[in-house]
Image (cartoon, rainbow, N blue to C red):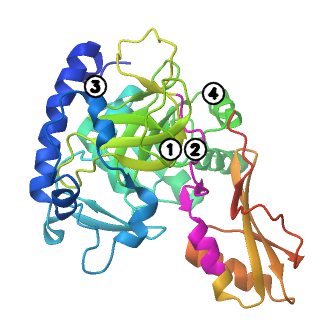
Amino acid sequence: MTNYDKLETREIGVRDTEQLIALNEQIAYARKNTKYFAKSLKHVDAITNLDALEKLPLIRKSALIEAQNKSDPFAGMNAKAVNNLKNLFLSPGPIAEPMGQAANEHRLARAMAAMGINEQDRVLNCFSYHHTPAGLMFESGASKIGCPVYPGGIGQRDDQIQAIGHFSLTAYVGTPDFLKLIIEKAKQDGIDVSTITKAMVTGGPFFPELKHFYADHNINAKECYATADLGLIAYQDEHSGLVIDEDVIVEIVTPGTGNRVADGQVGEVVVTLLTNKTYPLIRFATGDLSAILTEKQPSRRSNKRLKGWLGRADQTCKVKGMFVHPEQVAKIVSKHEEVVKARLVVEQNSGQDNAVLQLELLQEMDHSLIAESAKNICKISVNVIAFEVGNLPNDGLIIEDKRDYS
């Protein structure tokens, strides 16, 4: 595929030098324009090499829930005043994310271009446009490339199928499993949706079974790694691994610390943004696990690559495109006095996430009430299974992810 720009083919030494300059500029900008970094980076001298980044303090995504409040919704990390922002989002957690006025602020255009989306395409965007930023993030990327977008949002397969046929849509962006549901429903109804030949997926595991399904349907499906806070982190091209975005610095550290691990070793992904002037996050610990790929790839793109998403450093996990936190499961328990203990078990069936909320109950109650609480708090549907007190494992797990990532 054609390179998005010349940054992707830089020599390693040139990239390091240019990123070091950008890093010092971003630190100075963040210190001047945000309350949080004015304090946390107050005594930081100029960074003389990229390895010295390791000495700066981490921001843990898990800590944002407590740090954000009504009077300071972004915990002082926003460099633009709230009234000067384009959009305000409140993702499950809840965690607030800002969106500024800059075009392609989250840099998704690079990932979309790498998998072949161009100005001749018509994009079906099946990410949510409400509450969370994914829909607008991908729309902004598509607009940067120059292709029109159908804002399908989540669910409503019949409407998505109708739009594909009416507009001859050619490219899908959304969670890995939802396009499969669209295709299966269209086949059941005898409707041709074969104009979709490209797919950019994220927001959940891209299981081998799904990859084979899309290949069998002549769809070039690639994944990217992006978050609501950071935007694009890494993306897939025609070679192994996920290429790290040119406008970020990625470190892999020992979970629970800020200490880097050797390339090839699994650790927590820590990201520093170099170009975002709305939310200039520095050493943001995502809670995701990955590793730097050590095998060199025959690609024109010269940046390092991640092995992909390898799970969570904590018990938080992404289910059906939504992060679910242990605190949310505890909140479900607190709403129902009959519930003594809860454990969310996440499995995968035919390429789709399946969430089961296991409970210990003091006495029988209507399971639908608990399922409704889970829907309201975690924003996902769950099946509820009840046990007598003392029957759940005594291992400290609140969320158990049984999905196979191999």
Does the CB distance between marks 3 and 1 fall below 8 Å?
no
Q: Which of marks 4 and 3 is nearer the N terminus?
A: 3
Q: Which residue is drawn at 36% across and 42% down?
A: 271
Q: Residue at x 59, y 38 (%)?
A: 310
Magenta stretch: give its range. Answer: 307-332
Residue at label 3? 4
- Disc 2 residue type (three-letter): Pro
Residue 162, x across and y down, in percent: 52, 54
Residue 379, x across and y down, in percent: 56, 70
Residue at label 2? 176
Q: Is residue 245 above or below residue 190?
A: above
Residue at label 1? 202
Q: In this view, does 128 lie above or below 14?
A: below
Residue at label 4? 215
Q: Quadrant of the N terminus?
A: top left
Label 2 and label 4: CA atoms lie apart by: 13 Å
